[in-house]
């Protein structure tokens, strides 16, 4: 009797355990008396000898208890995985026990019997696995009924494995397994679909307040986008499976849902990026007033944005937030409006730039900063350097009249007449155009006055009384004028005399540089020395070449400035056959490093290019004077 033998073996194990505890107790008392510890080798031997017998009868008892349950119990209550696990585990342990009980005929006989019964039952495991497949649905049972001509679906609480075997269901195992395998694959697809939906349920939009606008924006959408990419690929792969037919409609609906959600979020983010760009622009009353149609469109988009974001903050779940009826169409319409707004904005900026071409040197953001605060002309100050070569800032009176221009070096040149930005009624390009005209007129006036003062003042006094660029221009005018007069009157001797004069003038300026001067005066004189040295060197080379006529190529190939204030306010600059008008652009008081023979060659090429309405740019190794030129 398996149960009795198992109980007897268990009792023996308990007795051995009790004996071990008794021995441990005796040894603990021996310690108190300082006696030696007693060893009980027989106990260890008995325990080792009993262990395989105990395992054998434990397995035999467990199987004898389980077998009736498996065969006669309700089959639907059996766990196929647990049964397979138990059978495999018992067979493996029986193999180990058989190795330890070699020579014990009785136990080995028991092992053979138990193993044979396990092997017999194991043959029924494929039937159990096929019948108890969790993926089997009613449609599969109906298909089996039609195929086999009988009902094989287990009835809960009634059908047993023994009954199935009696009915010969095991003979139809091949058909059962085929349907079961198909059911498993369908079930796997169904679980994947359910898992995707479960993964989306807790996903929420991460929103953040945006500045002081009173609304929110979306952020950190990388995880959501990654989930989209993963699930769309999985769904499309599922659509290609031959086992998808039972869920085909559901898969198509889920794919449409995913793609719809992604389209909504794509349009949403597109709208957000443009809204973030336009919101600060249209928060300006000046822009709203100057672009009424675009402002009205933006107000409509802004209203939609705030409404949707308020709803999203209240219910941030992605599945819910993107399921709002008409949301995709609303975002698409909003983006169409934003496209029109951007086009209108670009056209508006283009019109401003065409009115005052120097605004092309400003980026859209910089130009919008100016246009959004047209009531405050001071907002233009940080951007003046990009529009005007030499103007770093403008001097404003308390009444916001512009009275002077200031270079980055700190040189101040008064305007002939003040410019009133307020008279332009907020049209920045209009009063900047007036500033440009006033700049040219003021530089022209300064040159005219300086040219007149040159005749009546000592050269060293005159050089430190006028703006730097004016000194250089007038210096060049008089260099050209005096050289031509002397060459025309005395020929080569005139060139020699003027060379000597230039050397004297240069020495005077050098002595002046050593005196106590302001930083601006020193910069002016430094540039003047550079130009005068070049002028003196030109005369030296002309004397060496024997130039005695004004139409000699050595003279007409030089850069010459001509100015007759009686006839015209224009200054003509000539070089060989090229002639251009002086631009009267205020350049500030910048330092001149050097003028080389390469500089003159570049001048000739560039002057010829300008004469032909072309441009040019110096190119060459470092340190050859490109930047200075």
Image (tube, rainbow, N blue to C red):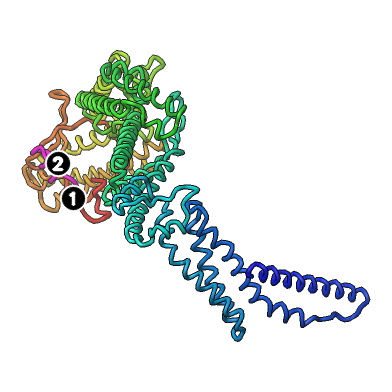
Which residue corresponds to mark 1?
A: 540
Q: Is residue 508 visible?
A: no
Neighbour tally class for label 1: few under 14, some 14-19, many 20 plus, Cα within 10 Å: some
Q: Which residues are magenta?
A: 604-618
In the image, is residue 75 above or below residue 575? below
Q: Residue at x 38, y 50 (%)?
A: 136
Q: Which callout, 1 or 2, points to the residue nearer the camera?
A: 2
Q: Residue furthest front?
A: 166
- Disc 1 and disc 2 in contact, CB within 8 angstroms: no
Residue 612 lies in magenta, yes or no? yes
- Name the disc covering residue 229, or none: none
Residue 155 position, x and y percent, is: 44, 48
* Disc 1 element: helix
Which quadrant of the rendered structure holds the C terminus? top left
Which residue corresponds to mark 2?
A: 615
* Disc 2 element: loop
The residue lying toward the viewer, choosing from 375 and 236, is: 236
Q: Residue at x 38, y 52 (%)?
A: 152
Residue 560 position, x and y percent, is: 15, 39
Residue 325 lies in magenta, yes or no? no
The residue lying toward the viewer, choosing from 402 and 555, is: 402
The residue lying toward the viewer, choosing from 597 and 42, is: 42
Which quadrant of the rendered structure holds the N terminus? bottom right
């Amino acid at each position: 009797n398996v149960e009795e033998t198992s109980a007897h073996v268990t009792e023996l194990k308990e007795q051995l355990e009790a004996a071990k505890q008794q021995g441990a107790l005796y040894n603990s008392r021996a310690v108190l008396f300082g006696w030696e510890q007693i060893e009980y080798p027989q106990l260890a031997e008995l325990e080792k000898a009993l262990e395989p017998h105990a395992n054998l009868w434990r397995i035999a008892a467990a199987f004898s208890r389980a077998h009736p349950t498996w065969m006669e119990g309700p089959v639907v209550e059996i766990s196929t995985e647990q049964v397979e696990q138990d059978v495999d585990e018992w067979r493996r342990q029986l193999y180990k026990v058989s190795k330890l009980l070699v020579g014990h005929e009785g136990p080995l006989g028991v092992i053979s019997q138990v193993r044979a019964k396990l092997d017999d039952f194991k043959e029924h495991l494929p039937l159990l696995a096929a019948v108890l497949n969790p993926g089997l649905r009613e449609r599969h049972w109906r298909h089996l009924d039609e195929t086999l001509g009988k009902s094989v679906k287990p009835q809960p609480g009634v059908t047993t494995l023994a009954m199935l075997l009696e009915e010969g269901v095991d003979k139809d195992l091949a058909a059962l397994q085929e349907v079961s395998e198909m059911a498993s694959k369908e079930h796997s697809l169904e679980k994947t679909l359910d898992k995707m939906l479960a993964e989306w349920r807790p996903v929420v939009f991460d929103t953040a307040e945006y500045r002081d606008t009173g609304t929110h924006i979306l952020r950190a959408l990388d995880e959501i986008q990654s989930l989209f990419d993963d699930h769309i690929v999985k769904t499309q792969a599922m659509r290609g499976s031959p086992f998808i037919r039972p869920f085909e409609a559901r898969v198509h609906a889920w794919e449409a849902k995913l793609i719809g959600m992604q389209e909504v979020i794509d349009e949403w983010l597109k709208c957000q990026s443009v809204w973030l760009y336009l919101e600060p622009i249209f928060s300006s009353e000046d822009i709203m007033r100057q672009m009424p149609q675009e402002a009205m469109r933006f107000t409509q988009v802004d209203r939609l944005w705030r409404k949707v974001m308020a709803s999203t903050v209240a219910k941030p779940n992605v599945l819910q937030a993107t399921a709002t009826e008409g949301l995709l169409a609303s975002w698409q319409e909003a983006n169409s409006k934003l496209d029109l707004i951007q086009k209108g904005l670009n056209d508006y900026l283009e019109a401003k730039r065409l009115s005052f071409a120097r605004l092309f040197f400003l980026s859209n953001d910089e130009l919008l900063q100016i246009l959004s605060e047209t009531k405050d002309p001071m907002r233009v100050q940080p951007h003046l350097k990009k529009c005007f070569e030499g103007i770093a800032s403008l001097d404003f009176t308390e009444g916001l009249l512009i009275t002077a221009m200031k270079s980055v070096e700190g040189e101040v040149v008064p305007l002939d007449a003040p410019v009133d930005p307020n008279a332009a009624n907020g049209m920045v390009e209009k009063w900047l155009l007036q500033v440009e005209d006033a700049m040219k007129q003021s530089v022209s006036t300064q040159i005219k006055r300086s040219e007149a003062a040159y005749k009546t003042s000592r050269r060293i006094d005159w050089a430190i009384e006028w703006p730097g660029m004016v000194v250089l221009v007038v210096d060049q005018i008089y260099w050209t004028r005096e050289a031509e007069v002397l060459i025309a009157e005395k020929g080569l001797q005139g060139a020699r005399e003027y060379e000597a004069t230039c050397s004297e003038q240069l020495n005077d300026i050098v002595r002046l540089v050593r005196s106590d001067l302001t930083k601006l005066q020193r910069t002016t004189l430094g540039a003047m020395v550079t130009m005068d040295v070049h002028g003196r060197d030109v005369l030296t080379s002309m004397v060496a070449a024997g130039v005695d006529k004004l139409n000699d190529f050595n003279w007409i190939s030089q850069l010459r400035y001509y100015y007759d204030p009686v006839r015209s306010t224009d200054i003509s600059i000539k070089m060989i056959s090229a002639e251009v008008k002086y631009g009267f652009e205020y350049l500030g008081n910048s330092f001149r490093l050097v003028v080389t023979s390469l500089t003159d060659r570049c001048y000739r090429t560039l002057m010829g290019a300008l004469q032909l309405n072309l441009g040019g740019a110096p190119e060459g190794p470092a340190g050859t004077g490109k930047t200075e030129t």
